[in-house]
Amino acid sequence: MVVYHLDSGNTHLLNPIAGQVLKLLADGPADATSIARQLAGQIDLESDAELDDNVAGLLSHLDSLGLIEPVPA
Amino acid sequence: MKLSQIEAGELRRALSTTGLRIRTGPFVCHVQSPFENIADGVQLFYKDFTCEAEGFADFHLKLIRPANLHRVWRPQVTCSLNDESPFSPLPSDQAFAVFESLLNWSIYTTTYNYLIIHGATVERNGFAAILPAPPGSGKSTLCAALVSRGWRLLTDELTLVSPASGLISALARPISLKNNSIDVLQDYAPQEVFGPKIYNTIKGTIAHMRPPSESVARMHEAAVPGWLIFPKYQMGSSTSVTPLPKGQAFMRLSSGLVNYPVLGAQGFEALTQLIDRTDCYNFTYSSLDEAIAWFGALQPPSQNAAER
């Protein structure tokens, strides 16, 4: 998936998982654990602590690119 | 009127005084120069183009002799766009190549109503094959070879994509061949018209190939993007083709676009549309015959808006 960031003018090529996470977040805010759970259901991944960590890392990376931002829980 | 209707002496006089306005695709280029090699080049390569003595022009190009001593012992050409000259003088025997580069630069730096891809584009049966590539990849060689075998020339250097329609506009200007590819093309397509070799330019030796009259006559026909093919000339290699995932094709194309950052979201949309409707390939070749055969067998694009 290719996305364009309006504010920075940057274009990003995302791998399928990152693309899927961005699509999930487009539906509304969610935390790493719930995203991991949804991902595990959609793409045949084991839902465990390692997946939660990877998703948290991915969210942090997407945040640093300005593609998502944290909201109050 | 057509440029070929102007007699040689008159053409030279016009260029050295009020200048000529030459239409190339969507642009009108007003050029003034006293150099005979520019007049000769314009007469040879732009004979089928229309020109006007007066009227609006998008670019005002001047290529003149600088006011210095070089004038006497090593003649130079200095050039300007719209009376601004950020360029260093160059030897005057390169004047026609300087004119071609200056016109490229003018289009590159002042055009924002098209997405500009650095690459050649040719068309057949209504679909355009875009050959984006850095210098040295053999895109001009391939472009010239395809044009000599019946493909319509849209452009050798600057591919103009309309963000509104997604179609590609033609410029139909001369093809600039460099170094070894000059002799290769002169052997491969002896029926085409080539200009004199211009030595010691910043890109080595350059010679131009005249655009076919039919391509020039059809320069106002935009073409539908069909294939996006990244060529790479590799000496001695066999022809090798690999489909390119659309996401990768997008990134590869966008990284080399001069005005993509300026166009912003509009550029992104235009590029998305372009990638969606084209089949994308990496194409390595060394044999022109094999390359032409492969292009000739291209099927119409599948136009699947696949997941990017």
Image (tube, grey):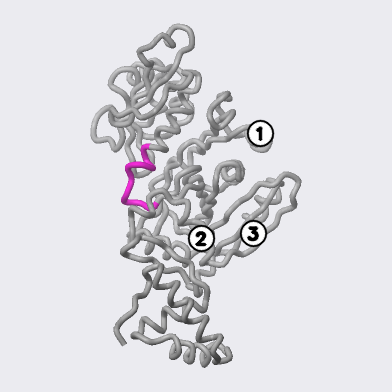
Circle 1 or circle 2, nearest the eye: 1
Chain at numbered mark 1: B
Tell me the magenta residue range.
B106-115
**Residue B126 at what x, y percent from top left?**
48, 57
Q: Which residue is under mark 2?
A: B226
Q: Amino acid at mark 2?
A: Gly
Marks 2 and 3 share the same chain: yes
Residue drawn at x 76%, y 46% is B236
Q: Amino acid at mark 3?
A: Ala
Residue drawn at x 55%, y 49% is B133
Label 3 near label 1: C-beta < 8 Å?
A: no
Q: Is residue B78 left or right of residue B247?
A: left
Q: Which residue is under mark 3?
A: B297
**Residue B182 at what x, y percent from top left?**
63, 33
Q: Secondary structure at mark 3?
A: loop
Q: What crowding class fits label 1: few (fewer than 14 Cα within 10 Å), some (14-19), or many (20 or more)?
A: few
Question: Would you identify the image quadrant in which residue B207 lies?
Answer: top right
Q: Which residue is under mark 1?
A: B180
Q: Secondary structure at mark 1?
A: helix
**Residue B164 at what x, y percent from top left?**
32, 60
Instruction: Residue B112: say if magenta.
Output: yes
Q: CA distance from mark 2 to mark 3?
A: 13 Å
- Point out the tag, 2 or 3, that comes first from the N-terminus: 2
- Name the one closer to the observer, B134 or B7: B134
- Point out the tag, 1 or 2, that comes first from the N-terminus: 1
Q: What crowding class fits label 3: few (fewer than 14 Cα within 10 Å), some (14-19), or many (20 or more)?
A: few
**Residue B83 at what x, y percent from top left?**
28, 27
Instruction: Residue B53: say if magenta.
Output: no
Chain at numbered mark 3: B
